[in-house]
Image (cartoon, grey):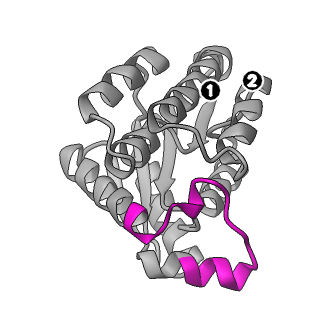
Amino acid sequence: MLLTFEGLDSSGKSTQAQLLVDRLNQNGYRTLLLREPGGTPLSEHLRTLLLDRQHLAITPMSEFLMFSASRAQLVESVIRPALDEGTIVICDRFYDSSTVYQGWGRGLRLDEIQRINHVATGGLVPDRTIILDISIEEILTRKIAAGYGTDRIENAGNLFYQKVREGYHAIAREEPTRIILINGLRPIEEIHKEIWHLVQQLQGL
């Protein structure tokens, strides 16, 4: 089973992914938590390049293809073998991030992104995708509270993030069975309980 978490930066998706992994482990399930880009030596190297603020001249298409290369490596060498062994894989971002960040945010053609997403993943589709939805204003509030700086993509500005958020809402409407849009402004434990209830309803759990 493949479960993915999506959302704007600072939405709380990484926290919720870890909480879900911990809960599954406590209930005796074998899990693997991954992040995108990352999860393999090549993917981690690409992550460094993609998020480095010194590499500001990366074009939108180059950015997308680098994310896709990282994803292809992760799927073939890590995700599929884990799924074949019966492991529940939880991924912090997957191809939906490319659809909304490079498509809606950067303005690349959605049909091209979807086609390359399919090639990069070998047609692998998550069993469920959970999107943590927060406002654009909340991003800044959380970053200031946490004392975080910004990476190259996070430095894109409010208009960019507004487009990305619209993209998340759009794909949630398009695939209501797979994608669950959750209000990320609520208390962490309350969100976790909702996610755990959703996961328990999946066939095989």
Neighbour tally class for label 2: few under 14, some 14-19, many 20 plus, Cα within 10 Å: some
Magenta residues span: 140-160
Nearest the viewer among 202 and 80 is 80
Q: Mark 1: which amino acid?
A: Ser
Q: Residue at x 46, y 38 (%)?
A: 60
Residue 164: image quadrant is bottom left
Residue 70 shows which numbered tag? 1
Q: Mark 2 points at which residue?
A: 42
| Residue situated furthest right in the rendering | 41
Q: What element carries label 2?
A: helix
Q: Which residue is drawn at 40% across and 25% down?
A: 117
Q: Mark 2: which amino acid?
A: Leu
**1 or 2: tag closer to the N-terminus:** 2
Q: Are marks 1 and 2 in contact (CB under 8 Å)?
A: yes
> Could you give the CA–CA distance between mark 1 and mark 2, rounded to whole angstroms?
7 Å
Nearest the viewer among 85 and 68 is 68
